[in-house]
Amino acid sequence: MPPAPPLRTQSIPLRRRFTPDAGTDLQRCLLCETREKSVCNGIGDTELAILSQASKRLTLPPGTTMIEEGTPAVAFFNVTAGTVKLFKSLPDGRRQITGFADVGHFLGLTNAGTYSFGAETVNTVQVCRFLRPQLEKLLTDYPLFERRLLAEVTDELAEAQEQMLLLGRKTARERVASFLFSRMLPPATPSQPDAEGCLVSLPMTRVDIADYLGLTIETVSRTISALRREKTITGTDNHGIRVLSVNRLQEIASGQDSR
Amino acid sequence: MPPAPPLRTQSIPLRRRFTPDAGTDLQRCLLCETREKSVCNGIGDTELAILSQASKRLTLPPGTTMIEEGTPAVAFFNVTAGTVKLFKSLPDGRRQITGFADVGHFLGLTNAGTYSFGAETVNTVQVCRFLRPQLEKLLTDYPLFERRLLAEVTDELAEAQEQMLLLGRKTARERVASFLFSRMLPPATPSQPDAEGCLVSLPMTRVDIADYLGLTIETVSRTISALRREKTITGTDNHGIRVLSVNRLQEIASGQDSR
DNA sequence: CGGCACGTTTGATCTAAATCATGGTGACGG
DNA sequence: CCGTCACCATGATTTAGATCAAACGTGCCG
């Protein structure tokens, strides 16, 4: 029914951009600062050399297509810097972003032979790439790695259910508030806890936010403006807002809101 | 913004209804017909007695609350007959059904100490219940069990992403078509493949369908009527419709639709 | 320095689906 | 057998958010 929206993907997949980082030594994983946040923590310190060999670290510029929906599922990624957006599309171009994978998150897991979703970098991203056979070997060799992955997928599923509640039953206002609130929960940018309000980083564009919340860019923009007008948030920078009242935001997000 | 809808839960949790089945012998799992459809298949034939001891089979009448959102996560269930609905709610009563767990599906997995969702039987349901410590022992003792569970959760996540696309970007017509189509994919009720059209069983009420698709009962009702009027489906039974044109239904579901 | 491209904001209008309202049907119990 | 209750269908009206339409800033490049 809705007419096909204009194509929004400003980026094209560039194979030559998949350049491995220069210094890929065997100590890489041991020194990795994001290890404890990720599945890699399921592998002991002594065996980390194996992990380094099983994976390759890549640096990807903003707007790089990492996964194209429907292509063979050959790799699994672990994000060590930046933000990746995951999405599904309809033939006419309508798109739903199903999640943003930040530092410590994995992506690319699937049972089917092909990916059922696409993935594209939001900003400059660093990932560790595991090819499928290597991943499977890690799973069988390191039970704690598998256990950790199971836990991560379980969390991911719980988040997905929360997002279904948002998409199916929340108002635009509640959706935007939920989004901002969830973005300030993990200590991603824990700058000043509440010196001048908590800073929330929004590396993605309004289009991405809209496609994540099941809204249009106009509605997202208007709603953010309204929250600004009523002093729940401040900041005119498009990629970083400041939350003035966390409680207020949470109330709106959970639907306990007057207006 | 939307006023609290009237309470829709016609059922109340009845502790006394959690009665274990009479004949719980050690051979139960070996004879279980739904084993190969479920995580239990990760355990070898010889060790099935252990599985029988780790679980308890229960028969639950329609409308039984199995899991109450926010309560301690003490059990994990495997559905062996019937259909269970999983849902999340907002304080004012708005509800989103996040999935229907049919035969072979598990429910109740979580990392947090409490359930982040509720679960209620749609019709008469049989489940095998594992208490949490028992489940964890199975996971560590039987790698194939854990691997199978990881695969199930991964599938569940893919389904959740598909549902996010539906909730965020599809029209009412596309949502209903997608629902009916997805319900006929698994050979749940594989009666006649296409003798007089494929039969699809809908054990849940219109309210449940609406809460699953992020619509109102009126819209669901009208949309089903429209599909009937245009001969894509037939049947006046509320809990079972017949798909006359599978292709047509799939086209509508995926958004390639004229009207 | 001017112009173009991109992302964003804001206003006016439209519409798909929600809400409000009513009637029908079948199951169940007294 | 009749009243009640749960569920479903359908018509009339309203509305939240989509769509259509400018206009504004900012950064980039010739």
Image (cartoon, coloured by chain):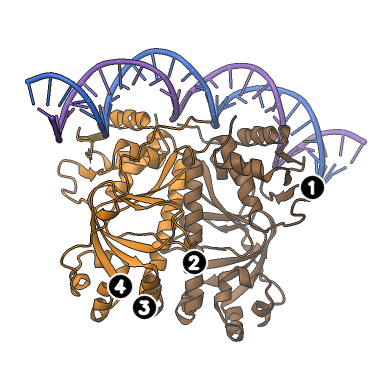
Chain colours: A orange, B brown, C blue, D purple
4 or 2: mark nearer the eye: 4
The residue labelled by disc 2 is B151
Do residues under tags 1 and 2 come within 8 Å of each other at their CB atoms?
no
Question: Could you say where residue A103 lies in the image, as x and y percent from the top left?
Answer: 27, 57
Q: State whether residue B121 appears in this view.
A: yes
Q: What SS does tag 4 mark?
A: helix
A25 or B160, which is in the foreground?
Answer: A25
B77 or A128, which is in the foreground?
Answer: A128
Q: Chain of mark 3?
A: A
| Res. B243 image quadrant | top right
A24 or B165, which is in the foreground?
Answer: A24
Residue A54, label in figure: 4
Q: Chain of mark 2?
A: B
Outermost residue toward the bottom? Answer: B46
Under mark 2, the amino acid is: Ala
Disc 4 from disc 3: Cα separation:
13 Å
Q: Which numbered disc, 4 or 3, marks the residue that appears first in the sequence?
A: 4
Write the residue at 55% across / 52% down: B99
